[in-house]
Image (cartoon, helix red, strand yellow):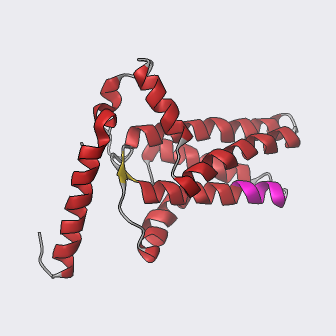
Amino acid sequence: MATETRDPFFSFPHPINASVARSVAAGVVVMAALTIALDVPWLMFVIAYGFIARVLAGPRISPLALLVTKVIVPKFRLPYDPVPGPPKRFAAAIGVGFSMTALILEFGFGYTAAAYSVLGILIFAAGLESVLGFCMGCKVFAILMKTGIISKGICEECADWTVRADRLKRDAAEREAREAAGISG
């Protein structure tokens, strides 16, 4: 399964490279921390747009995700580490909720301290993803699948992802070896 939706523009990668997800999370941490440290609340619009773009279309229209996939990952040769896409999309949707809440608190009500507190929670969650590879949204997704709130049909592979992940890593390594040897196909 290449994507989880029918429309190729409004789709989310499945699987997704965990190196990309972790690098994007690092970018979110940096932007949110700069928003607070430099007191530049307009950066919340950039953060919120990024989350909305990633939920709607994966990395296609997210400047941060494009930077990560086109520049950061290749330049630093970050490993291909496939993880299921649907939980990452769910986590990004939670990011939409937090970033929009911060925006509303700041620009709707003028509650800067409350908005920055919400960004602090976002920094914590994105920091866990970036530094430790621990995705809080993905854990919530798994709990919601186990309780039946999210249908198991959304990500049937999520229950036993290791088999597919191992195959995808092996396929990627073989493809790289062929490319290094100058063999096409």
Left or right of 169? Residue 141 is right
The quadrant holding residue 161 is: top left
Q: Using the image as rendered, state which of residue 142 and residue 154 is in the foreground.
A: 142
Left or right of 41? Residue 32 is left
Q: Position of residue 152 (x, y in %)?
A: 33, 25
Q: Position of residue 41 (x, y in %)?
A: 80, 51
Left or right of 37? Residue 12 is left
Q: Residue at x 55, y 43 (%)?
A: 52
- Locate the N terminus and report the quarter of the image it occupies: top left
Q: Position of residue 141 (x, y in %)?
A: 47, 31
The quadrant holding residue 25 is: bottom right
Q: Using the image as rendered, state which of residue 78 and residue 86 is in the foreground.
A: 78
Single out the residue that lies furthest toward the top: 148
Q: Residue at x 12, y 74 (%)?
A: 184
Left or right of 121? Residue 62 is left
Q: Residue at x 23, y 67 (%)?
A: 173
Magenta stretch: give its range: 32-38
* As drawn, 168 above or below 86: below
Q: Is residue 50 magenta?
A: no
Q: Position of residue 22 (x, y in %)?
A: 51, 56
Task: Decide whether the magenta segment is chiefly helix, strand or loop.
Answer: helix
- Residue 137 shows in the view: yes
